[in-house]
Amino acid sequence: MKRSPFFCTAPAAEDGSLAILHLKRDTLLPVTLDSTADEGYGTQGAVSNTRFGSFPHDTLIGLEWGSQVRASKVDTGSRGRKGKKNNVEPAETHVQEDVAEEEDEAKVSRKRSADEAGMNEDGSVSAVKKVRRDAPVQQPDIAASQKRKTDDTNATQGASKKQKQHKQQQRVHDNSASTAKPPVEANSGFVHILQPTPESWTSSLDHRTQVVYTPDYSYILQRLRVKPGSRLIEAGAGSGSFTHAAARAVYSGPTASNKKRKVGKVCSYEYHEPRVQTLRKELSDHGLDDVVQLTHRDVCEDGFMLQAVAGTSHVASPLANAIFLDLPAPWKALKHLTRSDAATTEESGDSHERSPLNPNLPTHICTFSPCIEQVTATVAEMRKLGWIEIEMVEVQNRRIDVRREQVGLRNEGLRGVNPSAASVEEAIDRLREVEGGMHSFHGHMKNGADGRGKQPANGSTDNAEAYGRSSRTQPGSKAARLAKIKQEAEDRKLYKEGNLVHRTEAEVKTHTSYLVFAVLPRVWREEDEKACEEVTPYEKIVHGEAAKNAASTEEVEMAE
């Protein structure tokens, strides 16, 4: 059994393992780390390119989960070819050599053709041709001679082509081996490398359908009472978001022969075949094959029974005690989720043989519907089939953003702050500074850059430009002020400054739907009642307690 990264995660990222690159709060990128993949980046293997830079997998493998990773300047194998430091010939030289070789081959081919035709290269008749024309006519085997010439020409051209291909491959190998450089840290940005979890997978997976987000499936699994060892039916697997969360919830640990315990199982169904193939590959790559059994089927028509043996008509029951239906018409699938099947009872006499439910436990169900009309039809069908404790819930998730808010002119030019005046005094001081700069500018323009009080007759702005360039380096300029603030910020603890504020985020990525919960109790027969009485004899317990209480009362009265 392949170790699943969703169940047993190593303390650090390993080669070939699944990792999640955290770009922003709601932007995550799943990657499979591979140090041997050749994607055209020299000897650096695979590289993940993001908006924050390039991240070679060699820089990610071996890091502890949660580590911050700086972007790298990736060497694509072409750097350094133009210079002579690495003693590598430029690519243009190789192209010129190839062109020269092709021209030489073309000249040889033309000359050979002319010799065979008895013509010179300029088109005139050669002396050899004249002699042959005047000589007595002979009858050689012309067909055999032409065939030999053709075979020799083809062999020569084939050998030349192979030599050229070998030379090109050798050049590519030499260039990649000599010019590939180790990654150098860049200033474009950074990411965090996280271990895979159902929560991070939900935020990063490819949305082939509308997915069930964490606020919904966490509440659903709790209401369905799913625990390690439970058996759950999921109809409408879609992109696999709920599938991964349910697999973690039912997982009961690695299989051990010396320990008896219930083995959890998720029986997932999907009617769309391309989505089934994609999800099956993902489950295999994530090591969830033994926990999740994916079936391509329309459960509204064909039900939930599983194929017992591949290639046969024998069926087996999932024996589920929890059900999740994410279907367009969940009420159509409820007819297959009953304790007894009339047609089956007439054939086999066993009311539990073809039921997908566990006969010894109550079954909890949840349907996921975006429209209230779907809820109405589902609830009506549940009442007809004997479901009880029917309840509809709508999950509204709101995330609170808590951060420090820094306001003040001393934060001007810094990131993530509000560079507005924090008080009236700061605003007045800034206005005085601006007015002082304006007076200084106009005074300088009035006196002239040379100090003689003369202005250019043609209205030139050279004086203003000269003053602008010089004012950027003055102590009171904006550039000098920002440089001073940036230098002082290196010694400040910005994470402790400002006020701690919290705000509700305007938009939260969650799917608003109606959740319908219900319970189908187990069938209780006379034999079940008798078995219960044998384990817990009601009359003996009641009478025994009554006699004991009476004896204790008499003892108390006698003592008094």
Image (spheres, helix red, strand yellow):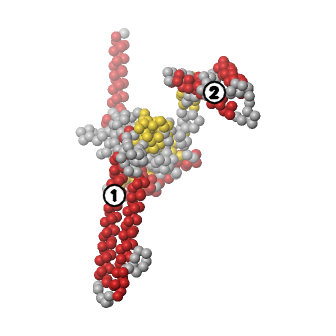
Residue 40 visible in the snapshot: yes
Q: Residue at x 48, y 37 (%)?
A: 188
Q: Quadrant of the N terminus?
A: top left
Q: Residue at x 61, y 24 (%)?
A: 474
Where does the image place residue 338, in percent across and percent down from the top left?
43, 49
Q: Is residue 359 above or below residue 491?
A: below
Mark 1 lies on a secondary structure that is helix
Instruction: In this rendered view, identify the residue nearer to me: 127 or 143.
Output: 127
Instruction: In this rendered view, identify the residue nearer to me: 37 or 360.
Output: 37
Q: Is residue 420 above or below residue 179?
A: above
Instruction: In this rendered view, identify the residue nearer to me: 101 or 410.
Output: 101
Task: Say whether marks 1 and 2 touch (CB < 8 Å).
Answer: no
Where does the image place residue 307, in percent across and percent down from the top left?
35, 55
Give the numbered dot on residue 487: none
The residue under label 2 is 471
Residue 531 visible in the snapshot: no
Q: Residue at x 34, y 47 (%)?
A: 177
Residue 390 appears left or right of 244: right
Q: Amino acid at mark 2?
A: Ser
Local crowd size for mark 1, using a 10 Å CA cut-off: few (<14), some (14–19), many (≥20): some
Q: CA distance from mark 1 to mark 2?
A: 61 Å
Residue 405 appears left or right of 102: right
Where does the image place residue 225, in percent across and percent down from the top left?
42, 38
Number of numbered discs: 2
The residue under label 1 is 167
Mark 2 lies on a secondary structure that is helix
User: In the picture, residue 483 is in which quadrant?
Assistant: top right
Residue reaching furthest to the bottom: 136
Residue 362 appears left or right of 389: left
Q: Residue at x 36, y 53 (%)?
A: 172
User: In the picture, residue 44 is in which quadrant?
Assistant: top left
Residue 466 appears left or right of 229: right
